[in-house]
Amino acid sequence: MVPLGLIPFRFPGLASGPESGLARISCAFTTRRGGASQPPFDGANLSFDVGDDPVAVAANRRQLAAGLGFSGWVECRQVHGDVLHIEPDATPLEAASSLEGDALATSRPGLALCIKTADCQPVLLAHETGRFVAALHVGWRGNVANLPGSAVARLCAHYGCVPSELYAVRGPSLGPQCAQFTNFEAEFGAGFEAFFDAAAQTVDLWRLTRHQLESAGLLPGRVFGLDQCTLSNPGDYFSFRAARVTGRQASLIWLNAGA
């Protein structure tokens, strides 16, 4: 099998002091390259829910887990809502999950949180001490519901921290020039005009998510983004806007066991 395409990411932090816990945290974003899936899911599709051969999907997942070295993972059946699962149990690697929601958080070492996307924004969060990590599936409906902001508030309430102690990174997703919404007023409503280009009928979802995270209390220097547009790079990423029948890449964050 061709190796899966991976984009590793590390939160930049100090070698000592409170940020040293960031060394415990690993993040990875997959591409569509490699894998066992056949067209139109070629090649590293990681979702059982899009019509791909489940044997190929399971092989892709096993290869991913073996390559990254986490001991288990948890994923949701994503529904464009705002349900946050805190400290969920692991879900099967080789079968679709029945856990419904769009946000996950854990303090368990070795358990990777998985978000599957094909244009929506995957947002990975981490506490500066490495105490816990979280992962969000932020489609445009998630932005309208302010999932980034509400998730930050709930995480801080549960884990007893403040938003300024968090880091965040947004993965590859629909870029500002490609996020067209011809029914902007009906779909977004009031309050989002600053992110809408009326002439192009596009919404800068990347800037909107950053705004929501910073408004929730994250420090601007702790919010990162992989500015790669899924629609503009069909050789590297699955895009639902490019093809309704397509695969899903994955974004993962976990605490390294034994670190």
Image: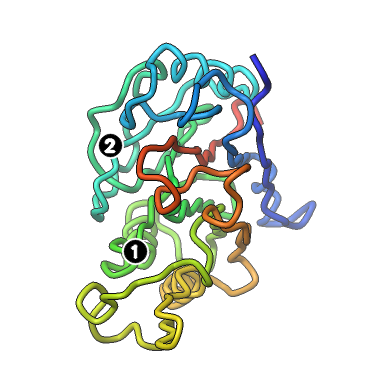
Residue hosting label 2: 77
Q: Quadrant of residue 54?
A: top left
Q: Nearer the viewer, residue 102 or 139?
A: 139
Whether 42 is drawn above or below 71: the answer is below
The local secondary structure at tag 1 comes to helix
Residue 13 location (% of width, % of height)? 72, 57
Point 40% across, 79% down: residue: 201
Instruction: State the residue in front, 131 or 37.
Output: 37
State yes or no: discs 2 and 1 in contact (Cβ < 8 Å).
no
Horizontal and vertical percent position of residue 185: 24, 82
Three-letter code, disc 2: Arg
Q: Residues within 10 Å of mark 1 (few under 14, many from 20)?
A: many
Tell which circle, 2 or 1, labels the residue nearer the N-terminal end: 2
Which residue is at 68% across, 41% downward? 8
Structural distance between the alpha carbons of marks 2 and 1 = 17 Å
Q: Which residue is mark 1?
A: 140
Question: Compared to 67, does 74 lie above or below?
Answer: below
- The picture places residue 180, in percent across and down from the top left corner, at 40, 70
Asked whether 190 or 14 is in front, the reply is: 190
Q: Residue at x 62, y 61 (%)?
A: 227
